[in-house]
Amino acid sequence: MWAHWWEVLRLCSVVGSRPYWQRLAAFVVSVWTLCWIGGQFLAPEAAPSAVEVWRGLLERIGVPDVAWSGRVVRAWENAGVVLAVFGGLLWAATTERGQMPALLGWIAVMLGSQRLGYQPSVIIAVGAMAGFVFVLWAVSLANGRFVDRYPRLLPADVFRAGVTAATLSAVVPLYAPAVVVFRLFHPYLTRTPRILTTEYDSGHTPGVGGWSRVSR
């Protein structure tokens, strides 16, 4: 049981293992989703929509011309269910090395909520992801337990991939607060000392009183 929780914690730490531009995109999407979700709980009756939250964030950083967001809403206003299902499938496609689908999935769910609302959009997305993983798991039960010549679905691996996708998608709203907390406490953390090797790769040993290279 504890091994499963340690695996979930390990996956949470993997969220930061991505290229710089993806970390920047993850921070922006995290702030957006966190403000959107927080508004649903703080003021359920007067909670702003995802697009209204985006407009507010842009206005706070000095980008007042956000008329294009209205055109985006009008273009996708009749595709609420499709966007929610598409967002859930993007969540299901998330892996440790490919975490962008989780961000795109949240954006699709938030756009879908413009017509469906917060709760229906999230429920449909989660149901689409869970249903997709369940179908693959059910199909995998008919396969053998070993992989011989061709890739195949194995129940344990399907379940593990589903847990990975769900965890990496669920922590997207928490990414920005985690980055802020880490940057705040990072200068005060003491790391364990690094063990230095006694020889360089070329076979030279360190000089006395330091690690200057000794020529022979």
Image: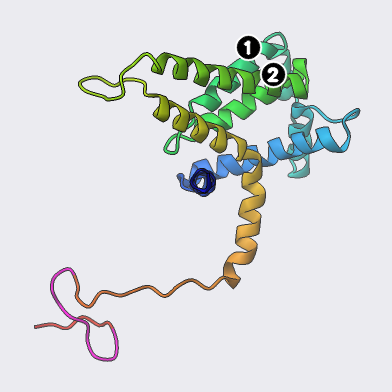
Q: Position of residue 165 (x, y in %)?
A: 51, 32
- Residue at left 54%, top 37%? 168
Residue type pointed to by label 2: Gly
Identify the secondary structure beneath mark 1: helix
In the image, farthest residue toward the top: 78
Q: Position of residue 174 (x, y in %)?
A: 65, 44
Dominant SS of magenta comes to loop
Q: Which sits in the foreground, 174 or 32?
A: 174
Q: Across the whole image, how many numbered discs are drawn on residues?
A: 2
- Cβ atoms at labels 2 and 1 below 8 Å apart: yes
Q: Which residue is mark 2?
A: 112
Using the image, tell me which numbered label, if any, was put on residue 82: 1
In the image, farthest residue toward the right: 45
Quarter of the figure with the C terminus: bottom left
17 left or right of 25 in image: left
- Please report the bounds of the magenta region as a residue range: 201-210
Residue type pointed to by label 1: Val
Mark 2 surroundings within 10 Å by alpha-carbon count, few (fewer than 14), some (14 through 19), many (20 or more): many
Vertical placement of residue 151 versus 15, above or below: above
Looking at the image, is mark 2 or mark 1 earlier in the sequence? 1
- Residue at left 63%, top 37%? 29
Q: Which sits in the foreground, 72 or 124?
A: 124
Mark 1 surroundings within 10 Å by alpha-carbon count, few (fewer than 14), some (14 through 19), many (20 or more): some
- Residue at left 78%, top 38%? 38
Q: Which sits in the foreground, 138 or 24?
A: 138
Vertical placement of residue 70 versus 180, above or below: above
Decide whether residue 29 is among the magenta residues: no
Q: Which sits in the foreground, 165 or 7?
A: 7
Using the image, tell me which numbered label, if any, was put on residue 54: none
